[in-house]
Amino acid sequence: MPRRACGEHGVGSAAMSPREAIMATTTLVALQPNAMSPAQLAAVSYLARYSGSTHRLYTYQLKRWFDWCEANSLDPLVGIQRAHVELYIRHLGACGLRPSSVNTMMHGVRGYFRYAHIDGLIAADPAVYARLPKVHHDESRTQGLDRLELIRFLQVAQTISVHHGALAYLLGINALRASEAAAVGIEDYRETLRGHRVLHLVGKGNKPATMPLTVPVLRVLEACRGNRTGGPLVLRPLSLKPIDRRDCYRMVQRIAKTAGIPRHISPHSLRHAAITNALDAGVPLRDAQILARHADPRTTEHYDRARGNLDRHGVHFLTAYVASV
């Protein structure tokens, strides 16, 4: 079959066809069933379930599926069989995507067919049994910080500004994501529950969460708050405007440079450091999962550096047990 080159158009490319306009917009168009094909109607209906970054991601993933189907003279929905989905998965791999990236690219496509089947638009789901690349998970590849580096990072952050200090503690102790830390407001940590000062936040997937604030963290947050009684907590030190995700990256990189940490450090590196150091400190996996707010404990396991510690390998305990007989 003829295939389009791997260099796909971006979501916002120019000179888009009506089909591409429907697929590329991040604001859902008004439903026009009479002017849409079943595939387009199914796509708009499916994407209506999501918003924000998830909506944009799934829009892009479906656009790549639609483009591949168009290049191979296929309807994106009607008549699709498992073999077509398997060929598309192979096509993604041939474009140079790693197995984990191929699996991620298929999230939107698999969901698209799943709900089309639920809605009765197709008789069977062709993607449900499609074979995805095997991903061998080991330790997280993110460059985190060890205990001494994390301590130095937190100390140096407070010397730059109270805002850098608050951001560092939210990321490195409470394991917040960059967008979550940027969204923390002064009103979000006023409440006390069962003797603990707590932080209320809305995390990934719009899931609400409540986290305790330890005394060192609370002290830094209060220093950042100053005399303010409301509004965003962490501000840009010079303009005093609320920070966003990009500001988080810049502030973290400045702290890392000042602290003399030679490698690239991002906000996720701080979240990674919080989880890995908690596990190194002996925090049970279940409690580390709660700290990280992971839905699946296997995700938290990827942060466990001790899994590769040969001195603690179970073979030593088994040998000692058998030899003692």
Image: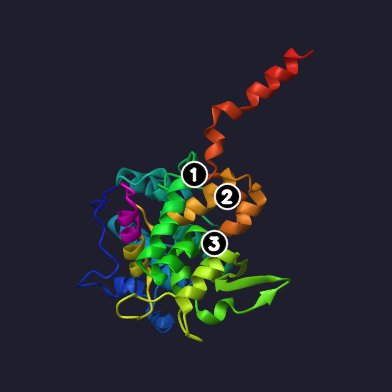
* Crowding at mark 1 (Cα within 10 Å: few <14, some 14-19, many 20+): some
| Residue, disc 2 | 278
Secondary structure state at the residue bearing disc 1: loop
Secondary structure state at the residue bearing disc 2: helix
- Residue 249, above or below 7: below
- Mark 1: which amino acid? Arg
| Residue, disc 1 | 131
Q: Can residue 79 be seen here?
A: no
Q: Earlier in the sequence, mark 3 or mark 1?
A: 1
Q: Is residue 143 magenta?
A: no
Choose between 159 and 124: the one closer to the eye.
159
* Highlighted range, magenta: 253-263
Identify the residue shown where x is 64% and y is 27%. Answer: 314
Labels 2 and 1 touching (C-beta < 8 A): no
- Mark 3: which amino acid? Asn
The CA distance from mark 2 to mark 1 is 36 Å
Choose between 325 and 54: the one closer to the eye.
325
* Crowding at mark 2 (Cα within 10 Å: few <14, some 14-19, many 20+): many
Identify the residue shown where x is 47% and y is 57%. Answer: 107
